[in-house]
Structure formats: C-alpha cells, structure tokens
C-alpha cells in the first residue's frame, strides 16, 4: 500500500465519521461498513471485493443501536478503515477484516470516551466566550477545534495502521494457525446472525410476529423468490396490517 493510499483512507475515515461536516443523516449513512467497503475498494482498486468485505461487517452491525451514548456493540468506525483495505491486500478475506476490526473496536470505544471528555473542556471555553458576547468566536471554538482534533487523531491512526499493517499483515496472518483461521471463517458466517437478531429484537413487539420472518425465509429458500419480490410482498402485508389496525382504532 502506498503512502498516498494510506493518507487517502485516513482522510475518508475522518470525513465519514464527521458529524459536524456531514450532518446527522449523512453521518449515520456514510459511516456504515458497506459504504466504507465501497470507498476502500475505490482507493485500493477493487470495488467489488471492497463491497463484499464491507457487507460482511455491515451484517454484523446491522442491528447496532446507540441509546443514551451506550452502544449495543463496540464501534468499528475507525478500525474498518484499515481492516477492510488490509483484508483486500489478502485477497478480500472477510476473516482478516473481522480479526482486525473487532479487537480494535474496544480500544476505539475508550478513545471515543476520552475525546468526549476533552470536548467538555472545549465546550466550557465556548461557554465563556458566549458569556462575553463573543458569539462568532464561540461558534468557531465549538466547531473548529473538535473537528481539527478528530481529523488529527482519526487520520493518524488509520494512516499509520494502514502502512504498518501492509508490511506486517503477511507475518501476522502466516503466524496464525490454520485452525484459528478456520474458526474465524466459521464465525464470519455465524456473527451476522447476531446483528440480525439484535435488529429483530428491536423491531418485533411480540414473539408472534416472528411468523413473518419465517414466511420471508420460506419464500426465499423454499419457493425461490428473490429479495426484491419478498420486500414488495412484505410491504404489501405491512400496509394491510396498518390499514386494519387503523380501522380498529377508528371503531374503538
């Protein structure tokens, strides 16, 4: 991996995690592993494999929820930006991406807490400027300083690990026993179930609604319908249920 590619990945890793620049909706969309996989694929010259590796990480984190600052799974907002490119250097093995992204996610969570505490100092400085009537200075203090701090930290971590990893990943992977890589391969297939289980747990109001999940599974695996057709059928069923519940509410 070239220095330019590592710097580019570091820049995109910071940009896609920038709430201040992208806004809430952009931040929630562009930080997803599927988008990261596409961008990493563009930088590394293999978009297809980048999306495939990103899709595996996306399946793991599809049901991730963040309530009151507490995430249901450790974030991979930073680690995916060096895990996916390094996995592409190994032929696009999703097992490599998982082995790199998930362990670092716990360190990233601690780093995020540290940054939040540092931002409290900046926030109090902005409060002092507001009390003095210096609103423009307060705005730029609250916006520019945390943004610059995130740029330096995110870009440095991603760039350095991309460069170090590109030289050391062969040694690390070759040192891992084949049995361990086989276990990681199995978990690559199983772990996405955890993401979908978390998602279902947040969507279903009661266990009886699992029948719709079973119906969709049967239509896909037994009948052989494609996902788009099943989505249309599911949308029609959801609309009918919505209409029935609305009529019941009006009658009541």
Image: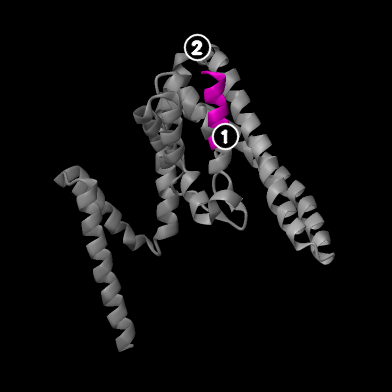
Considering the whole magenta stretch, tell me its main secondary structure. helix
Crowding at dot 1, Cα within 10 Å, few <14 / some 14-19 / many 20+, comes out as some
* Residue sitting nearer the eye, 111 or 195: 111
Q: Estimate the x, y position of residue 244 in percent, counting from the top left.
A: 26, 76
Q: Estimate the x, y position of residue 131 in percent, counting from the top left.
A: 83, 66
Above/below status of 236 relative to 102: below
Q: Looking at the rendered structure, which numbered label has been put on residue 238?
A: none
Residue 6 part of the magenta segment: yes
Residue 59 part of the magenta segment: no
Who comes first in sequence, dot 1 or dot 2? 1
Q: Which residue is mark 2?
A: 174
Left or right, 125 with respect to 23, comes to right
Above/below status of 157 relative to 214: above
Q: Estimate the x, y position of residue 54 in percent, counting from the top left.
A: 42, 35
Q: Looking at the rendered structure, which numbered label has been put on residue 11?
A: 1
Q: Which residues are magenta?
A: 1-12
Measuring 37% from the left and 60% from the top, which residue is drawn there? 207
Above/below status of 13 relative to 183: below
* Residue sitting nearer the eye, 87 or 207: 87
Crowding at dot 2, Cα within 10 Å, few <14 / some 14-19 / many 20+, comes out as few
**Element marked by disc 2:** helix
**Element marked by disc 1:** helix
Left or right, 11 with respect to 122, comes to left
Q: How much space separates mark 1 and mark 2, taking CA atoms?
A: 30 Å
Q: Residue furthest left?
A: 223
Above/below status of 60 relative to 92: below
Measuring 37% from the left and 30% from the top, which residue is drawn there? 47
Measuring 80% from the left and 51% from the top, which residue is drawn there? 121
């Amino acid at each position: 991996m070239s220095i330019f590619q590592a710097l580019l990945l570091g820049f995109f890793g910071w940009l896609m995690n920038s709430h201040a620049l992208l806004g809430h909706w952009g931040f929630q969309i562009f930080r997803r592993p599927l988008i990261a996989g596409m961008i990493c694929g563009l930088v590394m010259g293999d978009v297809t494999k980048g999306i495939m590796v990103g899709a595996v990480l996306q399946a793991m984190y599809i049901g991730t929820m963040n309530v009151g600052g507490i995430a249901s799974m450790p974030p991979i907002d930073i680690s995916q930006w060096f895990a996916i490119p390094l996995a592409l250097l190994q032929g696009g093995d999703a097992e490599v991406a998982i082995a790199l992204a998930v362990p670092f996610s716990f360190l990233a969570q601690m780093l995020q807490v540290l940054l939040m505490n540092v931002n409290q100092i900046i926030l109090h400085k902005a409060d002092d400027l507001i009390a003095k009537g210096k609103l423009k200075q307060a705005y730029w203090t609250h916006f520019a300083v945390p943004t610059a701090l995130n740029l330096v930290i995110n870009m440095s971590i991603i760039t350095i690990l991309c460069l170090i990893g590109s030289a050391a990943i062969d040694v690390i992977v070759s040192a891992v026993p084949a049995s361990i890589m086989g276990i990681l391969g199995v978990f690559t297939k199983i772990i996405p179930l955890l993401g979908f289980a978390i998602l279902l747990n947040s969507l279903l109001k009661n266990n009886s609604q699992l029948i719709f999940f079973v119906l969709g599974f049967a239509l896909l695996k037994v009948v052989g319908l494609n996902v788009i057709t099943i989505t249309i059928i599911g949308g029609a069923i959801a609309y009918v249920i919505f209409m029935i519940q609305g009529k019941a509410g009006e009658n009541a």
